[in-house]
Image (cartoon, rainbow, N blue to C red):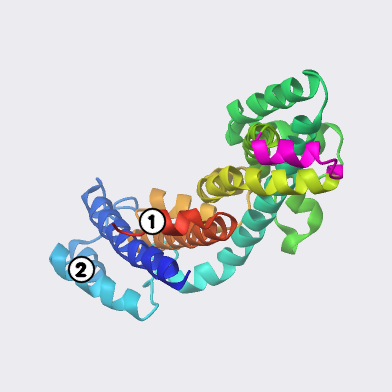
Amino acid sequence: MLRFFLSRIATAIPTLFIIITLAFFLMRLAPGAPFDSERALDPEIANNLRRIYKLDLPLTEQFWFYLRSLAHGDFGPSLHWRDFTVNELFAMALPISATLGIKAMLVGIVAGTAIGITGAAGTGGFGPRFVDGAAIFGIVLPVFVVAPILQLIFGLKLHVLPVGGWNDGAWKNQVLPVIALALPQIAIVARLMQAALTDALAMPHIRTLRAFGMPWVHVHSHALRAAFPPVVSYLGLAAANVLTGSVIVETIFGIPGMGRYFVDGALGRDYTLVMGTVIVVAAAVLLFNLIVDLVLAWLDPRVRYESRPR
């Protein structure tokens, strides 16, 4: 298992470096500059600002300087929020985004698994068909459609939940954003679980357990272990979907998380803020995929052996 873990780390580090490199140079190649959106500055003042933020250096020197700062955990000063560094903005925004993302993932996994098991265990064709229909409905509806519908129904019509804001993390302010983020994941996990469990229940060793008259719980516990790997392998992609979806959800609900800062940074050509957001999100996705790989290797040891070089 240690060798498997180290091989995944060895793959993740160059991947993160490539993401940093691509994001850095693509940001610099994009039209516009950090101070172009403001009213016309005196050329001397503009030159001084570029010198202060080291934007007057050659691109390769800027990249080297950024990597050195990054090695010390310093994302640099924000070019848009002039009184803050990117680290200070992340210290405020990251806990909020992490709270929403973790809760959305938990809701997606638990609710999707429960619905998938119910569909696979249902008798006749109604249960599986109902799960399939509901899953397709949840998959095709994008987050930027679901979120305003939830605001309209529960905020403006029923007046039971606030339509936006964070309010220091009050639970009422978290319900709609978490549901909006979790709904697509519930649909996908439910469909995957139903299909995987249906196949697992038809496997020879499960039929043998039934033939020996083993209890229902015992049979399904074995079937679930065989059904979980496809669902677990999807969770890495689900984490990426939740992180990217949080950009939209936080903007719609006016939540001061990483997504809102990313949008503001992109619109204001805040190189350091956008770079910092990309790095944090990429690192989170890589970390979650590493956890998924370890869980998969624990559930199915063949994953470890198949990953070894021959």
Residue 221 belongs to magenta span: no
Local crowd size for mark 1, using a 10 Å CA cut-off: few (<14), some (14–19), many (≥20)? few
Query: Residue at point 34% right, 67% down?
Result: 10
Q: Nearer the viewer, residue 200 or 236?
A: 200
Q: Quadrant of the C terminus?
A: bottom left
- For label 1, the residue is 307
- For label 2, the residue is 62
Amino acid type, mark 1: Ser
Image check: 232 left or right of 282? right
Position in image of residue 57 (x %, y %): 15, 69
Amino acid type, mark 2: Gln
Answer whether residue 183 is visible to the viewer in this image: no
Position in image of residue 96 (x %, y %): 63, 62
Q: Nearer the viewer, residue 105 or 160?
A: 105
Inter-mark Cα distance, 2 to 1? 38 Å
Asked if 7 appears above or below 201 in the picture, the reply is below
Q: Secondary structure at mark 1?
A: loop
Which tag, 2 or 1, sits closer to the chain's start? 2
